[in-house]
Amino acid sequence: MALALVGAAGCTTLLGDGYEVVAEDAAVHHDAASESGHARDAKSRDALVKSEAATDAGCMALMSLSNKSAFESTVCGGLTCTAADNAELAGNTHCTDDAGAIACALPAYTPADAGAPDAAQADGGHHDAGPVLPKCSALPALSSGFKYPSTILYAIGSTAIQPYVAHIAQLLAAGVPSVADGGTATSATVIYAAAGSCVGVEAAFAPAGSSPPPINTLATTANYYDPMLDPQGNPIPYTCELDSTAPADLGISDVFPSSCTGLPFAPPTDPLPAPYYDFYGPVQVMEMLVPVRSAATTISYEQAGLVWGYGDQAMVSPWTDSTLLFRRSASSGTQTMISLAIGLDPRSWVGVAEATTTGVKTALLNVQMTGLPDGGTPPDPNANAAKTMGILASDVADGLRQSVRPLAFQDRGERCAWLPDTSLASFDKRNVRDGHYPIWGPSHFITTVDSSFIPKPTVAKVIAALSGTDPDVSKLLDVIQLYATNHVVPTCAMHVSRTSDGASYVFYQPPGKSACGCYYDDQVPLDATTCTPCTGDSDCTGAPGGATSCNVFGLPPKGFCEVPGP
């Protein structure tokens, strides 16, 4: 059953039933762009909501909304949504039906449920040495004669963030000239082990009286990067053997540290206690996907919890074969973030556990092409495709749109199922940025800081560069364009913020002249936009929605009128 809900002029609010509002009154935003990227930016909702309205196409009255349910149930600006069908759950043995309000019991975690840990990043395939990998602490010179900088930064964590770390690592290996002092370059060798988001948390945080584990106990190999790009403009990875017995300088996670259950050093709450600090970075979006041969288009909170919690025992059509459900593990940011969105412990998932994102991707593509995850052909390939589902981050999934498609997700107590984008033909992440699609969260850069919340200089440089706020890197790399074209959302393009995975969110306006929503739209590109090009603030007189600030980004620079932030 698919009910099209279309917003005409103005907004229509679809009131959900039984939704519990979490963290409604405040938003704590850690923003590397504000106060030199180091001080904690904790603001009440009243402090955040200072602008008249959002200038972007879509909802023009976001600032008036007070919680996640309000954002998800508001249809305006020509947005459309569909409704998932929970009717069959009325007779499900795992669920109860109270006058149409469905509640389903999910399995509790037991140690036997834990999935295999994520594998370390596979060999990049580019080596200057022979079959024996070089030690990461003593990298050999390249055949060109290039010698790697002696300053080494060890980082570990999310596989999803690795492509963006690679771009920053390439620039720092070559040397990034300083805009402030007339050209003195900052150089460093960034060693990155892509071992899973929660491994990044474990590597960078420990409670008082203990220390994080040595990085070489959490991964065996890591990548470092050539100072030159390949002919297609991509970083060139090499592989080294991790031999450092020190903790990582930087842990990177797609999920909040408190979401990482079952780790020795997982913090019970956010924010982190001193001397650790969690800097927020670009927003990652997670999706549940099916082959395009599947007829499924939506999935509800209740359906998703049952399918991933019980598999073929969930009795939720069409996902009735656990061997065709492709997931990650409890240390994966993708699985953990979706877990917090569907109310299921990340250690209690069923289905086929893939050690890497590539494993899930390959299985989905094979089912779409031939009908079996190993590439074989079953008697009825279409029947297998109908039963198949997997999970991926948008930056991977969106590149597969011709073969797999995201399911619109209907949150608990809601009547709208939203895609991350405004349609299957777009990549604008509009429904993420405006608070309709709920399975998203900021990247987390976890490190030690001093009493002024300042990390080590090289770590601070990498965090600012990954956040798109380092002026030196911005002269060499359009970070916002990099994220936009890879389906990741920089903080400056968001209109909502949240304080934990799965929790409520409130309206957010990027501070000062940092809002980049229109520039992001320009890079996507977005067909329908109210954005006004500009070269100075005077060009913004009369621009829609109180957009009086001309904010300039990009290489070459390009300006658009935005609402000035607090």
Image (cartoon, rainbow, N blue to C red):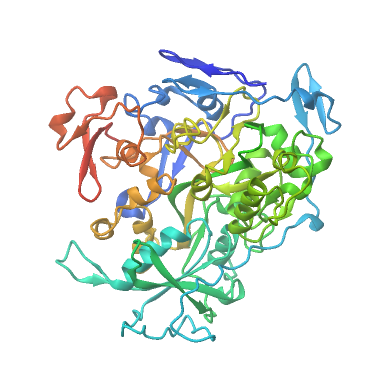
Vertical comparison of 176 with 35: above or below: below
**Whole-percent x, y for residue 432 in the image:** 48, 36
Image quarter (top left, top right, bottom left or bottom right) of the N terminus: top right
Along the viewing direction, whichever of 423 and 432 lies nearer the viewer? 423
**Whole-percent x, y for residue 473 in the image:** 28, 59
Along the viewing direction, whichever of 376 and 144 lies nearer the viewer? 376
Instruction: Please give the name of the residue rendered at 44% of the width and 47% of the height, measured from the top-left corner.
Output: 488
The image quadrant that residue 138 belongs to is: bottom left
Vertical comparison of 193 with 21: above or below: below
Along the viewing direction, whichever of 496 and 381 lies nearer the viewer? 381
Q: Is residue 262 visible?
A: yes
Q: Which residue appears farthest toward the top when viewing the image?
A: 9
Q: Is residue 456 visible?
A: no
Vertical comparison of 553 with 277: above or below: above
Q: How many marks?
A: 0
Image quarter (top left, top right, bottom left or bottom right) of the C terminus: top left
Q: Which residue appears farthest toward the right when viewing the image?
A: 93
Horizontal placement of 120 versus 135: left or right? right
**Whole-percent x, y for residue 507 in the image:** 43, 31
**Whole-percent x, y for residue 73 in the image:** 54, 22
The image quadrant that residue 144 belongs to is: bottom left
Along the viewing direction, whichever of 330 and 499 lies nearer the viewer? 330
Horizontal placement of 182 versus 524: left or right? left
Vertical comparison of 128 with 181: above or below: below
